[in-house]
Amino acid sequence: RKHASPLTWTEDDTPHSPTPKEQGFTWIKERGGSTEEARKQQSRLRELCSLAEKLGCTLAQLSLAWALRNENLHCVLIGATSARQLIEHIDSLKIVSRLKTEHLNELERILDNKPVRPPMISTLAQR
């Protein structure tokens, strides 16, 4: 069975979400936006996939491991659509210890969107 959605179905009717590598990054173009922006996003994805391959993990595992290492985040929520995907997400815990400062710096360079915690505002100063 095939659907006209980003999810495809395997022969045993279990959902399978194609990786950006499997899709050839064409989904970025399908989302719309400028051609230049699509090229930038494709370039970023290629670099991220390359870093994930160096670490021996998937892009999803790299994303989750990065989020777990990020001191500005308080929790990480996952949304697995299958038992296989849940196991893949749980396996991202193995990647956390392999993420060194150089990898985090590389991720920050690629994404250029490092989250920053807003400054703390004292309610006492407002009284």
Image: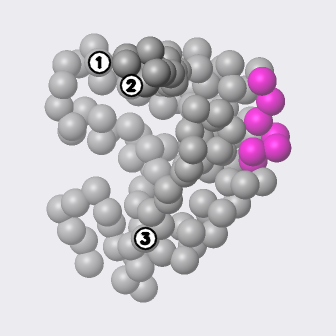
Mark 1 vs 3: CB contact within 8 A:
no
Q: Which of marks 1 and 3 is nearer the N terminus?
A: 1
Position above or below: 11 against 64: below
Which mark is in front, 3 or 2? Answer: 3
Q: How crowded is mark 3: few (under 14 residues within 10 Å), some or many (20 or more)?
A: few
The reply to whether callout 1 and callout 2 are in contact (CB within 8 Å) is: yes
Q: In which quarter of the image is residue 66?
A: top right
Instruction: Give the structural element (helix, strand or loop) at label 3.
Output: loop
**In this picture, which residue range is highlighted in magenta?**
95-101
* Label at residue 41: 2
Q: Circle 1: is it few (<14), some (14-19), or many (20+) Cα within 10 Å?
A: few
List the residue tagged with mark 3: 81
- Residue 49 percent across, percent down from the top left: 58, 36
2 and 107: which one is in front? 107
**Which amino acid does the dot numbered 1 rest on?**
Glu
Q: What is the quadrant of the N terminus in the image? A: bottom left
**Colour convention:** one colour
In the displayed structure, does residue 103 sit left or right of residue 21?
right
Quote the CA–CA distance across marks 1 and 3.
Answer: 29 Å
Q: In this view, does 4 lie to the left or right of 59?
A: left
Residue denoted by label 1: 37
Residue 45 in sight from this viewpoint: yes
Name the amino acid, label 3. Thr
Work out which quarter of the rendered image holds the C terminus and state it.
top left
